[in-house]
Image (tube, grey):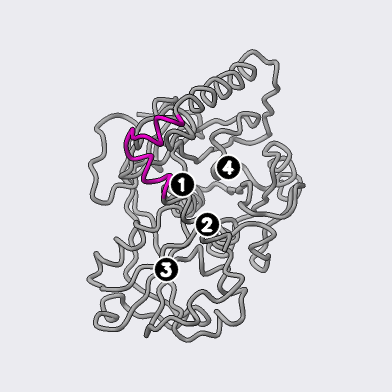
Amino acid sequence: MASRLALHITQHLTQAWTRRGLLACLLWPLSLLFGLLAAGRRTLYRLGVLRIHRVAVPVIVVGNVFVGGTGKTPFVLWLIAQLRLAGFSPGVIARGYGASAMAPRQVMASSLAAEVGDEALLTVQRTGVPMMVGRDRPAVARALLDQHPELDVIISDDGLQHTALARDIEIILTDARGAGNGWLLPAGPLREPLSRRRDFSVFNSLGTDVPVGAGNFAMTLVGDTAERLNDPSQRLPLASLSGQRLLAAAGIGNPARFFTLLKNAGLQFDELPLADHYAFEDHPFAAMSADKILITEKDAVKCRQNRSLENDPRMWVVPVDARIEPALAQQIVEKLRGYPTA
């Protein structure tokens, strides 16, 4: 019930945030207050009233100003791989959405999603990267370095607004939704003005044009296979599923992006958008008729921890990878090594 209510509210707000309609206008005074409070907080950090903490290695912050998913997790997976190819030893920190612990907690491949967060668990299972989650980003970064002194760069996943942690590179992701109606929360979808400073802008660009300019890069999420939930060694091309009764479900920030990927593969299916970070404590598909149920990797890490879902032979996962212009990796590496970006 709570998940359905959250999804309903999210869908209603998302629709309201696409234009400056009645609901957005009614909330606009609150967005002014939100903006003033956020600006005041940033000023306190800039003046030194609130302390900014620097750790012993460079920090790359990956985030967005648009509420909801813009593809950060696939981007972080790509960034980990690129840094390793360049000879770096990266670690990752995050809040860990839904994580039960306040203090820094190390993420293991066997961790429970309820304890460390689904995105953090996916990141570690895909890459094996040293990772910690917790609310206090500077404390989490220090704890990660204490446990893994071999690390020479830290990626902060979704830490753009956590000003207390000093950062050396800021990367902002956006997608086809752009700035929505252009207003701050709660009248619009923006945590900060879209014009805020950054080092690089990455556009999850399927079906959209990427603005021309230095520091702007396109990202495309690609996936053309499905793997069985309880046995990833069993893989099928997505195209081979055509003609079957399919259900596609997604508990991510922007389910439409997952559905579009499947449609572009030529599939027809019933759509089931779920609330972002849907817990999968029950079996939401038990009474549904389908030959195969296609889910995202983010949902899969929780479904594998639910025995009834894991053992459902209809459950198949669609992995995705980020494809990004090679120049972005080169410029990030150059900046880390002290060279100016081109």
Tag 1's secondary structure?
A: loop
How much space separates mark 3 and mark 1, taking CA atoms?
Answer: 17 Å
How much space separates mark 3 and mark 4, taking CA atoms?
Answer: 28 Å
How much space separates mark 2 and mark 3, taking CA atoms?
Answer: 17 Å
Q: Count neighbours of disc 3 (C-alpha within 10 A) and say few if under 14, some if 14 to 19, many if 20 or more.
A: many
**Residue situated in front as seen by the camera: 54 or 10:** 10
Q: Residue furthest top?
A: 47
How much space separates mark 2 and mark 1, taking CA atoms?
Answer: 17 Å
The magenta-colored residue range is: 12-27
How much space separates mark 4 and mark 2, taking CA atoms?
Answer: 30 Å
Q: Which residue is mark 4?
A: 156
- Find residue 68 and name its label: 1
Q: Count neighbours of disc 1 (C-alpha within 10 A) and say few if under 14, some if 14 to 19, many if 20 or more.
A: some
What amino acid is found at the position of numbered circle 2 in the picture?
Leu
What amino acid is found at the position of numbered circle 1 in the picture?
Gly
How much space separates mark 1 and mark 4, taking CA atoms?
Answer: 17 Å
Mark 1 or mark 4, which is nearer to you? 1
Q: Residue at x 31, y 82 (%)?
A: 245
